[in-house]
Amino acid sequence: MRRSTRKSSIGLSVEESRNPSGNFSTRFSLPSFLKRVEKLTEEQRNVIKKLGFGNLLLLTNQMLSKNLLVELMERWSCEESAFVLVPGMLKVTPVDVALILGLRMVGDPLILKEDEPFSELEREYGAALWKRKIAVSALESRLESIGDEVNEDFIRTFILFMIGTILFPNTSGKVDSRYLSLLDDLDNVGRFSWGAAVLEDLIIWLNKRKETSVQYIGGCLILLQVWSYEHIDLARPALVESSLAFPRACRWENIRSHQRQWFTSQFKELQEHQIIWELKPTSEELKFDIIKELLEAQNEREDSSGFEYLATGDSVNDDGLQDESNVNNASVVQEQEAAEVLVQQALASQHLPEVKKESIGYLPPLRCSALHKVDLELSSQSQNSSMNLVQQQEEARVHLQQPLASQHLPGVKRESIGYLPTSCASALHKVDLELSSRSQNPPVNFTIGNGNELIKRIQELEAENLELKKVNETLRMENGELRNQILLTDNFVARLEGLVMDDSYPL
């Protein structure tokens, strides 16, 4: 049996190529990308720069250290989305990605829609309705045939090639053809937060590696390796003698080769003084628009209760894009939380027990929540159709304050009435509508019975929500099983492809 002489497209040191302990494979291919960049004309380069990918064209050929990377992967925590080191936990932050790759971290999220219609553009690139994939090799051949031309075909093909080789490489060596829906209008390409998607995709692969010990690893591995150089003084190479300081992936020389055991011992003996916990942009880096807009966005969002980008790894699919349903879910949860606060305020004014926040869980956006049902029931009782919404609320507040005063109960402060999301009316609005509808009838006392009815309704809501949670948990378990089956299939296909590509294989 002959040994395969096929060479990997990823540069590895001699020691690492002979060391089986660096046990993962990848289709990340910086050399393939850089070879294509070398063939670009000046005009083609300028077009790519205008779309926001100019900093990627500056990357130099970095040799991946699989032994370093596998040691980092072993220390990844899925629960914390961080690397657990001896001195403490260390995360890959949006600032890290912006400084290392020079990609936008703010902007529109990249979302691949499950129900995205199959387009003629996908057909032109060789995809089929039953197999919406485009081989990276086919994209490379397409670029060769395009030559020096600068047109929309070149732009789309080059971006897809970047996606398949360095941004979101996967186990199959193919690119999801639905990316073309994001490239339909090329004027919008620069508006997407490509860097945020790269970070989320990398986190997904780190989670897969930790949870299932997959053989093939996707994601932008050069980001992870240079991140290690920047944060951890361990096997850190020398800086390149060059005036080019941004992005930071360009300023490091190639790493020296070390055995896996050496990295293991060094990580075990890591000291706090070897860690840079947070990267700070230099005065020169602060001049770049990508860094300025990121810091401005952070400051704005921190002032309004925290800075968030995309959701955690579960909200981004295997191609590095945020799932559409999670965007809707976030707004629904925010609306429900606002409603919960106002429910508690209304109940507190009647000296009733508070509704615990934990009791009101997430309700699917496609179903009408029990709170919304209460809205509809109370709204249907309103007979004063000639009054607009503002007049109804003002009249209701007068009626509400009168019975409260007669019972010597504290009044509801006007400041406590906040903005009400359009899809989920607040509990106070419910009381407003009910009292407004009764304004034409003989006055009645505001009794504790109304509060008891509300509590009873909320208990019914809790019961329904509990059932929905059980259904949701069952679906999540089934989804996890399906993902594992798909993953095993991908690994099997990848191994078969590897055997076919080898010069020889065992019979």
Image (tube, rainbow, N blue to C red):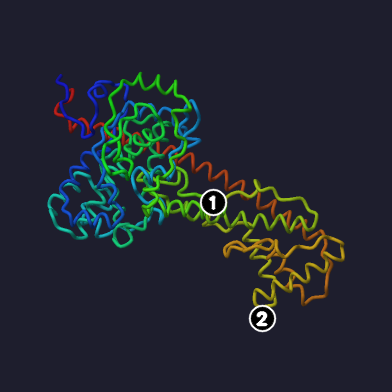
Near mark 2 (Cα within 10 A), the count class, few <14, some 14-19 or many ≥20, is few
Q: CA distance from mark 2 to mark 1?
A: 43 Å
Residue drawn at x 66%, y 47% as measured from the top left: 359
Q: What is the x, y in percent for residue 99?
A: 37, 44
Q: Amino acid at mark 2?
A: Ser
Q: Secondary structure at mark 1?
A: helix
Q: Which callout, 2 or 1, points at the residue further toward the start of the chain? A: 1
Labels 2 and 1 touching (C-beta < 8 A): no
Percent from the top left, x then y, of residue 248? Answer: 33, 41
**Side of 36 relative to 297 (left or right):** left
* Side of 364 where 284 appears, left or right: left
Where 231 falls versus 284 (above or below)? above
Residue 302 bears which disc, if any?
1
In this rendering, the label closer to the viewer, 2 or 1: 1
Q: Which residue is mark 2?
A: 386
Q: Residue at x 41, y 39 (%)?
A: 203
Q: Is 266 situated above or below 196? A: above
Location of residue 500 by image quarter: top left
Q: Nearer the viewer, residue 220 or 490?
A: 220
Quadrant position of residue 293:
bottom left
Of helix, strand and loop, which one carries label 2? loop
The kind of residue on which mark 1 rests is Glu
Which residue is painted at 57% across and 55% down in the image? 334
